Image (cartoon, helix red, strand yellow):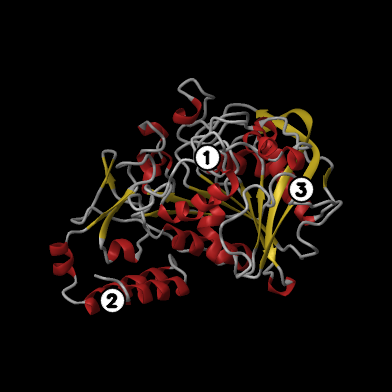
Amino acid sequence: MFLHARRFDTDNPSTTGIHGTPATATSVDLTAAGYLEQEFFLSGTATAYREDGEWGPDGRWSATEAGQAPYRTRLLVRRPADPERFNGTVVVEWLNISGGVDVDVDFGYMHSELLQGYAWVGVSAQAAGVNSTGGSPLGPNAVGHKAWNPLRYGPLHHPGDAYSYDIFSQAGTALRAPRGADPLAGLDVEYLLATGQSQSAMRMLTYANAIQPLDEVFDGIVIHSRAGFGAPLGSGTGVPMLDGPDGPAVVSPARIRTDLDVPVFQIVTETELFELGGTPERSFVAARQPDTELLRTWEIAGAAHSDAHALRILYPQYTAQFGTIRDLSAVIPIVNDGQQAQVVSAALRALRAWVADGVAPATADPIESVDGTIVRDRFGNAVGGVRTPAVDAPTATLTGETVQVPHNGATVRLDADTLAALYPSPDDYVTAVTAAADRAVAAGFLRFEDGRALVAASRTSHI
């Protein structure tokens, strides 16, 4: 277990420098939820890893120490203002750096569950979030912490992505036993859950297979929207569109090792089934594996890798932090607007029960496909997978495959004649949504409160 001394800074002046908020400050109303957002710096000596022996598709990957380097990075903390509300569970997110800056994608998908008593910690685990100086697809103003606020973040030092896995482990370990400041203000941590989405999900897969067996830091792991491979131990994502065709090699397909002693929850959308990997052997379908006592995979029908829900949260967050960026407002109405966030929130609740009480989540059928193509019903929606009212009481074709915006899917409204035939009256639509919501809640794919909210929304719709 290669964990070295780490320490939280005792000073926490989030408003130091030219900006009055920390980087990656959320656009979600934390005050209304009774939550605080604070920032801390974490420093220590991190270990780099290299592959030990040949890595194969079964995920039983060995890693060994490949050097050490000092680091100083930052953690963003959101916790209940009232300690009595804390439920004992901390969700630690590997912040996504696909756009060259730290992004808390899974907080956006999970926040309706998180803000019911969890603490959440975002870790600047990778170098780009700290060091990048431009080139982001969001525009020239989107830069890493040191360039965005030199006075506040100038002292940070990230030695490179080869050290990211150990930095993430040390962040989790330090939350349980802090030295210096206590980011959780004395909260009694019972369970640590790790999560990462997209680029971070590929890192999380490699973390689960190669690092968790060494460090044994986390009690449960969420891998959200990964393709059929993991990330390398060094720099790069393994995704050709991000790294280039000559980027670092990764195992394809790569599965979750079956000898882990903590639960792993994979959440997959239509986009990852074939599109995200780029080639059939790198697709998620190629990496499918059966559920086990400690593995669950939910493939969400009618969901996309990124969607309107995520963009509604991230766009105001981006503009508040960076000012003028790429205009995403025109994209939000045309990309996928399915019910992924509700399913992800249900998955988080289920994972907590799995870890705390030993109650395993529901199993789900995979999305049906034939010869690399998703099987669709007469409305264009995927067959199989985790079902939601959006696909079982449809008003639109919801796809995760690229139509106009890469990896964001699309929402194409059903025509008036089709809707009239499906739902001759508003009450018919409410009845269909109610039945679909009840099935999803009973199956464990929706929380009860989300099912009721979707039914309530159906009563005020214009169907």
Quadrant in the picture for residue 168? top right
Q: Along the horizontal axis of the image, is 167 left or right of 272? A: right
Residue on which disc 2 sits: 430
Query: Please, is residue 2 above or below residue 9 in the view?
Result: above
Residue on which disc 1 sits: 199
The residue at the point 53 percent across, 56 percent down is 108
N-terminal label among 3 and 1:
3
Which amino acid, by three-letter code, is at mark 2? Answer: Val
Query: What number is the disc on residue 262?
Result: none
Callout 1 secondary element = helix
Residue on which disc 3 sits: 16
Which amino acid, by three-letter code, is at mark 1? Answer: Gln
Circle nearer the viewer, 2 or 3: 3
Expressed as whole percent of the image width and height from the top left, the position of residue 128 reads 62, 34
**Placement of the N terminus among the 4 image quadrants:** top right
Which amino acid, by three-letter code, is at mark 3? Answer: Thr
| Closest to the observer, 406 or 5 | 406
Mark 3 vs mark 1, CA separation in Å? 30 Å
Quadrant in the picture for residue 396? bottom left
N-terminal label among 2 and 1:
1
Q: Residues within 10 Å of mark 3 (few under 14, many from 20)?
A: some
Q: Residues within 10 Å of mark 1 (few under 14, many from 20)?
A: many
Instruction: Residue at the far bottom: name it.
Output: 427
